[in-house]
Image: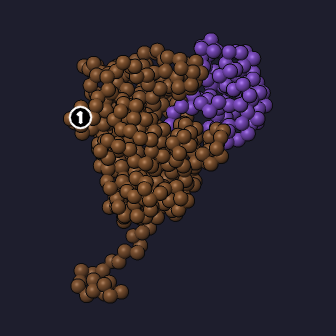
Chain colours: A brown, B purple
Amino acid sequence: MSTLAIPSGLEALPLACALCGAAHTAARPTASCAECLGPLEVTYPQDRTLPDRDTIAARPLSLWRYAEWLPFLGEPVAARQVGWTPLLEVPRVARALGVGRAWLKADALSSVSLSFKDRVVAMAINAVQAFGLEAIACASTGNLANAVAAAAAREGIPAWIFVPEDLEQAKLVGTLVYGPRLVRVRGTYDDVNRLCAQLADEYAWGIANVNLRAYYGEGSKTMAFEIAEQLGWRQPTAVVAPMAGGSLVTKLHKGFGEFRAAGLVDGPRPRIYGAQASGCAPIVRLFERGEGQIIPERPATIARSLAIGNPADGRQAAEVLRTSGGGAAHVDDAAILDGIRELASLTGLFGESAAGVTYASAKQLAARGAFSPDDEVVLCITGNGLKTAESLAGDLSGVPVIPPRLRDVAALLSA
Amino acid sequence: MPVPIHLPSALAAQTGGLRQHLGDGHTVGAVLDDLVARFPAVGPRLRDEHGEPYPFVTVYLNDEDIRLSDGFATTVCEGDEIVIVPAVAGG
């Protein structure tokens, strides 16, 4: 295996199996436990010193201000400016949901690739460097492709990006422009994912969401950390987030829990609500059944970034929704498009189809009585609407086209 | 009817390093049973104590997750391939 010579003391923390507890001792990361094939998770040093509020507040405005909760020892060598996206208060959304206050966690504005995947890729690209792997790769529904390709370009690391053939054009172009090896696979995301799991066995690549997954996933916790700090070191009462593989809701819950355990915030953890498209809602349906395993689905939805029919973290996600006192909702494609439009018109933020899922689901949950007038709700807006703008292209048919004359504008005014 | 089974490296310790096996049978379950007959240690990695698939181990017949068909009862045909993949990826 060839390696990249990185003059760094960066060290990736060890892994252990989340199911059987076996320590993972191999020199290079693998996707699963050698004992039971269960998922691996990062083992943090028990004796680490955690920072207080003032120490964190004095650090640079990136997700690395929470380094003690991230899976490395030493300074990061890449993606040092990722994170600290705006938390936008949105009173018109609060009124629409019938809650006390509402905010958008605007990862649609994330640097550098306009989705929350910048957070997880910040972990993956540093893991690639720490292990000296020869390339970074991923299976993606689009946003991860953009984030991996951008981060790899900046570091000069070869990237292999595998996506379903039918992704939105903006996500394909917005990946290819960075110069990776982009491969469109005939099939669904789940087919791409299976292929990448097999690739991880064959090549010395760091596949962000396969053999680097334990590191990668920890990046999502920083969304919870930022929400708590941006609210003035306190927690919202409820969070609504989209679900694809299910990792984000589990990491939000974990992140709020870690901040409570460190004494940085107090009170109960927020209720977590998960949102999916009706055309691919295996986690919501597991939540509604109340027990058992994920039943895989064949995705059929415009929300391609959420179109994972066999979600790896689905069972844990449903468990978090239950134990946090939250809930779940799914919405059809028409509601998703209405959700994108209404969210934009009420907040000035153009979210992608997953944002439409999140907002429309929040409204459905509100109509079902999930929220109270005292609630303080954060909606996680995980991707930018420009990436899925083609889903709204039909709206242009209602836009007037006029000659450049005053009387034609006057005619519009009187119409 | 012999059907090739492709195993992930994580299971190679249970098969003496072997990553491919030609199993005999008319269903996915029967073909896997043939593998387990030769390598008994791999059995508990493929099915839980109730004989059901684990959530973290996905079995594909050709490109199809067997849970989208009839699970271990899914019929196999001449030319089919079975691929076993640890299902911890995604997201």
Q: In the picture, which quadrant includes the C terminus of chain A?
A: bottom left
Q: Residue at x 38, y 56 (%)?
A: A102
Expressed as whole percent of the image width and height from the top left, the position of residue A257 reads 43, 35
Structural crowding at the residue carrying mark 1, measured as other residues with C-alpha within 10 Å and reported as few (<14), some (14–19) or many (≥20): few
> A315 and A260: which one is in front?
A260
Location of residue B23 with respect to A310 vertically, above or below: above
Expressed as whole percent of the image width and height from the top left, the position of residue A400 reads 35, 77
| Dot 1: element | helix
Q: Chain of mark 1?
A: A
Left-right relation of A51 to A161:
left
Expressed as whole percent of the image width and height from the top left, the position of residue A88 reads 31, 54
Expressed as whole percent of the image width and height from the top left, the position of residue A260 reads 39, 35
Quarter of image, res A119: top left
Quarter of image, res A179: top left
Left-right relation of A304 to A148:
right
Count up the numbered dots. 1
Q: Residue at x 30, y 36 (%)?
A: A63
> A40 and B79: which one is in front?
A40
Q: Which residue is mark 1?
A: A54
Q: Amino acid at mark 1?
A: Asp
Is residue A159 visible to the viewer in this orientation of the structure? no
Q: Residue at x 43, y 54 (%)?
A: A375
Left-right relation of B55 to A241:
right
Is residue B38 visible to the viewer in this orientation of the structure? yes
Q: In the picture, which quadrant includes the N terminus of chain A?
A: top left
Location of residue A94 with respect to A307 vertically, above or below: below
